[in-house]
Amino acid sequence: MEFAKINEEWFEGFKTDAFYVEGENAILRPTGEPAMYPIFKYWIMEGKLPIKIYQTVSSFRNEGKTTHTMIRDREITFWHEIHTAHKTKEEAGEEMEKHKKIYEYIWKEILNIPPICVEKPKYEIFPGAESAYEFYTILPNGRLLENGSVNTLGQAYAKKFDLFYVDEKGNKQYVWQVCTGNGARFLVAVITLHGDERGLVLPPKIAPIKVVIITIPKEGEDYLKEADELKERLDNIGIETIVDKSEKTPGEKFNIWDIKGVPIRIEIGEREVKEGFYTVYRRDLKERIKVDRNEIEKVLKYLLEEEIPKSLYKKVEALYTQKIKYFENLEEAKKWIEEGNVAKACWCGKQECFDGIKNLGPSIEATGFLTDEKKSGKCIVCGETTDRLTLFGKTY
């Protein structure tokens, strides 16, 4: 508790949501700053700058809102945090932009989902932070989900935790800090946006198994020799492959691996062996193609590295296009949101205009200023001229 109370602004932001340990002067950590920064002090005193620390850990919030599995939990699992400390404000600003680009890469190239990034207004940022980028996901039900934040902390925590270095003139200088974090909500986005009525559809870069080989036995022939030979070929080029040798029927195996979301299934039966091809099934499109035995490595690499990620990305992009609509009238925007969509509008960003959107109805909020798009117009709430845009809708 001693460290939790060092930064009063941080403690005020989390004290009502904290889990207090009965009989102890302690809380379960809602975020990592009070747990990590007392140690930072000693590393910085040794002259180790910049410091860049990554950790995965659980966080705990005594949520007053209704919980939703993996979306709003009292124990936030799979949580990762990046904490950095720098000599100058400029270095910290550059680091913040790097973190933003890292998250954009994760969304685009690894999760195959278009990133939505906003700059948060000061009154909406993480307690103790100075500025922040927030990433959002639009779920199929039209709700907005906060999904990753990048925060500049300035010197607020440094001054509270006495995080300083001595410059070349012998003067004490407080460090400048950045923190970034997210958790299981990455998986929420993947499950809801890529999945279908059959189960998961995993992007190739996060699928632990890229290819499953299933044989279709006939008249005493199990074709496992051919399956094992193909697995070895694929293992040799770095494609994680498994041969399903269970006693289940081919149909049962198809269903099980569809549920698990493995990107590619290869079927080997009598016809495939006799005619020298493989039947390749794409989980994302639920389509089969014939691939010549000698071309299989090249085709699979193309599918896994280019075609499937592109297909998944375009699917979500189409959903976002369908869900987002520009408005200049609040009541029209409210009706659109109530139908399970997200509104876009010019917005000045003042606190009263944030509240004006929030007053439209339960759970409706403005996200912040879109970072990749501007449009000249008038704030949808107050009518002030602005070139900044926001997305707003129902949130979790």
Image (tube, rainbow, N blue to C red):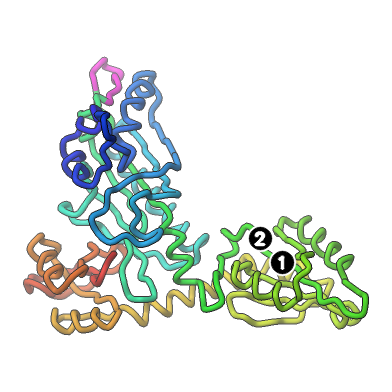
Q: Is residue 132 left or right of residue 317?
A: left
Residue in the picture at 34% in, 46% down: 96
Quarter of the rendering occupied by the C terminus: bottom left
Q: CA distance from mark 2 to mark 1?
A: 7 Å
Nearer to us in this view, 180 or 396: 396
Task: Give the residue type that dot 1 points to.
Answer: Val
Element type where label 2 sits in the image: loop
The magenta stretch is 163-172
Quarter of the rendering occupied by the N terminus: top left
Residue 176 seen: no
Nearer to us in this view, 47 or 338: 338
Which quadrant holds residue 356? bottom left
Residue in the picture at 28% in, 81% down: 325
The x, y position of residue 30, in whole percent, is 30, 43
Say which residue label 1 marks.
Answer: 212
The x, y position of residue 8, in whole percent, is 16, 35
Say which residue label 2 marks.
Answer: 209
Task: Give the residue type that dot 2 points to.
Answer: Ile
The x, y position of residue 75, in whole percent, is 37, 49
**Crowding near pointer 1: few (<14 within 10 Å), some, many (20+)?**
many
Q: Is residue 342 left or right of residue 360?
A: right
Furthest toward the top, the residue is 170
Q: Is residue 169 left or right of residue 218?
A: left
Residue in the picture at 69% in, 77% down: 281
Q: Are marks 2 and 1 in contact (CB under 8 Å)?
A: yes
Element type where label 1 sits in the image: strand
Q: Is residue 63 magenta?
A: no
Nearer to us in this view, 13 or 21: 21
Q: Is residue 166 magenta?
A: yes
The x, y position of residue 302, in whole percent, is 67, 69
Numbered circle sitting on residue 46: none
> Vertically, is 162 above or below 198?
above
